[in-house]
Amino acid sequence: GLQVFKEANPHLGAIVDDIVLNTLTGFRPNVITHLREHNIVIHDDGSMSIKVLAEVQGMKAASVDSEGGKFISREGAAKKVFTIPLVPHATQIVRERLAQIQLDLDAGIKNPDRLLFYMPNEKGVAVPVKTSDTTGKVTSINDVLSSIEVEGGIIEDQNDWDYKNNVG
């Protein structure tokens, strides 16, 4: 599904890569869409990790205000950081995205934040991949996911719990 879609729509590769990395890491979509080059740790053995502050949008921090809201930063307190090691497939995606950043910079795309998952806007500036969009064009994670067709896929009838007959 996703790989076939990416091959047919290479201009949407960043969105597909975002979806796959999100699945492999378990992060919330907003964390992955806002990853920057400085969030990537390359280890001596070539493996990689993602390092993210707890206060980044989409992260669930243990310290929240009494309303269950934003991360509480105490004066002088150490910042909470999550470091997630990447499996080989995720490492490959990140390597490809890092290479794409350089290719796009060489081609004139402006990416001052060094975003990993971005789509260039009409001015040639990198903007983070969107989780949803209402333009009617395929430009977001939700748009791509709703466009995926799996040949021979099973459609379940949620009203029929008999697994022998539960194919639409």
Image (tube, rainbow, N blue to C red):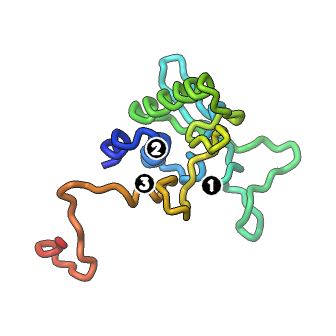
78 to 158, vertically: above or below: above
Residue that numbered label 1 is attached to? 58
Q: Which residue is more in the foreground, 153 or 80?
A: 153
Please indicate whether residue 77 sits to the left or right of residue 52 in the image: right
Residue that numbered label 3 is attached to? 144
- Tag 3 and tag 2, C-beta contact below 8 Å: yes
Please indicate whether residue 8 sits to the left or right of residue 139 in the image: left
State the residue at coordinates (55%, 28%).
Answer: 98
* Spatial CA span between label 3 and label 1: 21 Å
Tag 3: Cα neighbours inside 10 Å, few (<14), some, or many (≥20)?
Answer: many
Please indicate whether residue 168 sits to the left or right of residue 92 in the image: left
Q: Residue 129 in the image: state x and y as whole percent.
A: 56, 48
Closer mark to the observer between disc 2 and disc 1:
2
Picture quadrant of residue 39: top right
Q: Residue 127 in the image: state x and y as whole percent.
A: 64, 44
Residue that numbered label 2 is attached to? 12
